[in-house]
Image (spheres, rainbow, N blue to C red):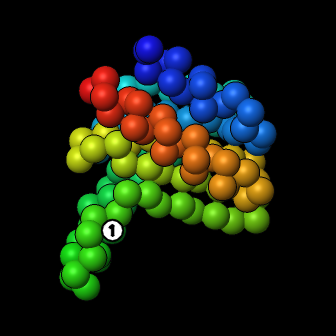
């Protein structure tokens, strides 16, 4: 299955998806799938890729394992990022907070499937 097919699969049955992308930790998009043409997944990726290092440093300073997932929520949007391995992550934008649980589930499944192909 191609990366594109994995990303499109995330959108099936997930209301409110704005877009989803597979990216590397340097902030480069490998593949993306957008529903809303106004969404620029490159911005999401560029902002989230350095956050992984910050979160890992913060966690290690209090003896926590590196994070697998990060979320940013506000009144109108939810952004969820899920690490696939040390080099790649998935990131998703939703138009509301009500799809977070299902979005996290889909990202977890897709991350596991994509990890096998990387």
The residue sitting at 51% across, 24% down in the picture is 6
Asked if one can make out residue 29 in the rendered structure from this viewpoint, the answer is no
Quick one: quadrant of the N terminus?
top left
- Quarter of the view holding residue 92: top right
| Residue ID for mark 1 | 55
For label 1, the SS is helix
Is 32 positioned to the left or the right of 75 in the image? left
Q: 55 or 64, which lies in front?
A: 64
Where residue 28 appears, x then y in whole percent?
A: 34, 34
Asked if one can make out residue 52 in the rendered structure from this viewpoint, the answer is yes
Vertical placement of residue 53 versus 12, above or below: below
Where residue 94 appears, x then y in whole percent?
A: 68, 47
Q: Residues within 10 Å of mark 1 (few under 14, many from 20)?
A: some
Q: Residue furthest bottom?
A: 62
Where residue 11 appears, x then y in whole percent?
A: 66, 31
Quick one: quadrant of the C terminus?
top left
């Amino acid at each position: 299955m191609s990366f594109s097919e994995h990303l499109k699969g995330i959108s099936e049955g997930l209301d409110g998806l704005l877009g989803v992308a597979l990216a590397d930790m340097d902030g480069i998009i490998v593949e993306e799938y957008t529903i809303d043409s106004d969404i620029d997944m490159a911005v999401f990726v560029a902002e989230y890729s350095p956050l992984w290092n910050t979160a890992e440093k913060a966690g290690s300073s209090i003896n926590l394992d590196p994070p697998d997932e990060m979320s940013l929520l506000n009144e109108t949007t939810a952004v969820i990022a899920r690490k696939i391995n040390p080099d790649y992550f998935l990131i998703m934008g939703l138009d509301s907070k009500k799809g977070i649980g299902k979005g996290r589930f889909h990202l977890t499944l897709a991350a596991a499937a994509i990890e096998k192909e990387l």
